[in-house]
Amino acid sequence: MTKKIAGIHQWRSGNYGGSKVNKAELIDGVAEAAGLSKKDATAAVDAVFDSISRAVAKGDKVSLTGFGIFEKSDRAARTGRNPQTGAPVQIAATSVPKFRAGAEFKKKVSGK
């Protein structure tokens, strides 16, 4: 059973119980922590996600001090193998999003 998180103050104190936090719960936490309505918190969270996505898609690096860096990473074309037949398969070049955690975020996750 997923435990509903009431607000960001619980996230800071580590009262998770190993559960997942979905977007709706994140919005609830932002609304409570910032004193916003749920509608305004939804708009704010969506705007942040959209801004980060658009910037990274353009090739910009988004650096949030203490949290981490979002960036676009290019993967070169390569030859892979079909796991069922073992036959070589050409894998096309692509771009993927990449995230590197910042020092403060790593510190919080490790519990130090």
Image (cartoon, rainbow, N blue to C red):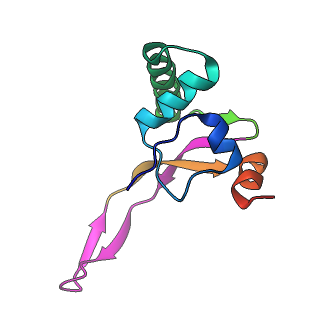
Residue drawn at x 63%, y 43% is 11
Is residue 1 shown above or below 29? below
Is residue 99 shown above or below 76? above
Is residue 72 shown above or below 86? above
| Left or right, 45 with reference to 81 | right
Q: Which residues are magenta?
A: 67-91
- The answer to whether residue 61 of the structure is visible from this angle is no
The location of residue 88, given as percent across then percent down, is: 26, 79
Residue drawn at x 50%, y 19% is 41
| Left or right, 41 with reference to 78 | right
Q: Which sits in the foreground, 23 or 100?
A: 23
Residue 19 falls inside the magenta stretch? no
The location of residue 103, given as percent across then percent down, is: 78, 50
Residue 84 falls inside the magenta stretch? yes
Which quadrant: the C terminus?
Answer: bottom right
Which quadrant: the N terminus?
Answer: bottom left
Q: Main structural element of the magenta stretch: helix, strand or loop? A: strand
The location of residue 56, given as percent across then percent down, is: 52, 35
Is residue 44 shown above or below 22? above
Residue that extends furthest to the left in the rendered view of this protein: 85
| Left or right, 14 with reference to 65 | left
The location of residue 67, given as percent across then percent down, is: 69, 41
Give the total number of marks visible in the rendering.
0
- The answer to whether residue 107 of the structure is visible from this angle is yes
Residue drawn at x 19%, y 84% is 84
Residue drawn at x 25%, y 72% is 89
